[in-house]
């Protein structure tokens, strides 16, 4: 008797589409905030890569124009450092974009209704049976 009352309460309160929508809307809001932060982070990484690329181009131009000595060990270190920054920023941006793509699509109201209906049916099937 008590089990049935609890089961009915769960079904009537928790497995209703409106209730599920309220619960999941908070989850979706956090997910959207996280996606915005990742998008901003990706833009920052792309900017860092572009800045490193621009610095490399200026160094190469200086070498071509004879302003910088190609045999200078500090210049070689700087070129290596800028290449590493550029390549790392690009790789990090690609990984972050992949993670953003894996977030998938959002949950539609119809999907919520379908889920609620299936959950109620599954719950009713479990409650209707006696334990083994």
Image (cartoon, rainbow, N blue to C red):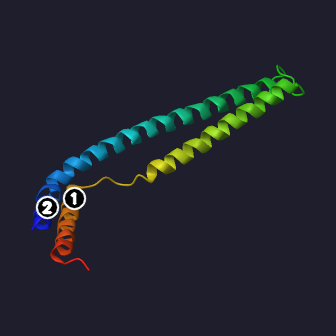
113 horizontally vs 89: left or right: left
Residue at image location 15% in from the left, 75% down from the top = 128
Q: Nearer the viewer, mark 1 or mark 2?
A: 2
The furthest residue to the top: 67
Q: Which mark is residue 100?
A: none
Image quarter in which the N terminus is found: bottom left
Category of crowding for the residue at label 2, using alpha-carbon neighbours closer than 10 angstroms: few (below 14), some (14–19), many (at least 20): few
Q: Number of marks in the image?
A: 2
88 horizontally vs 112: left or right: right
Image quarter in which the C terminus is found: bottom left
Label 1–label 2 contact, CB within 8 A: no
Question: Percent x, y for residue 83?
Answer: 72, 36
Residue of label 1 = 112
Q: Is residue 64 above or below residue 7?
A: above
Q: CA distance from mark 1 to mark 2?
A: 22 Å
Question: Percent x, y for residue 76?
Answer: 83, 30
Residue of label 2 = 6
Residue 102's image quarter? bottom left
Residue at image location 45% in from the left, 35% down from the top = 40
Instruction: Give SS at disc 1.
Output: helix
Which residue is nearer to you in this view: 43 or 95? 95
Instruction: Give SS at disc 2.
Output: helix
Question: Percent x, y for residue 62?
Answer: 78, 23
4 horizontally vs 79: left or right: left
Residue at image location 23% in from the left, 77% down from the top = 131
Residue 129's image quarter? bottom left
Which residue is nearer to you in this view: 32 or 62? 32
Residue at image location 67% in from the left, 40% down from the top = 87
Which residue is nearer to you in this view: 5 or 63? 5
């Amino acid at each position: 008797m008590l089990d049935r009352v609890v089961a009915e309460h769960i079904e009537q309160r928790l497995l209703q589409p409106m209730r599920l929508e309220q619960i999941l809307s908070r989850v979706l809001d956090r997910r959207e905030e996280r996606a915005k932060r990742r998008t901003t982070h990706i833009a920052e990484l792309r900017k860092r890569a572009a800045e490193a690329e621009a610095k490399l181009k200026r160094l190469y131009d200086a070498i071509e124009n004879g302003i910088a000595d190609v045999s200078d060990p500090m210049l070689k270190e700087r070129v290596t450092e800028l290449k590493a920054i550029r390549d790392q920023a690009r790789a990090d941006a690609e990984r972050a974009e992949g993670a953003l793509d894996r977030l998938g699509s959002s949950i539609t109201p119809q999907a919520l209704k379908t889920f609620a209906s299936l959950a109620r049916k599954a719950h009713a099937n479990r409650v209707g049976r006696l334990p083994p």
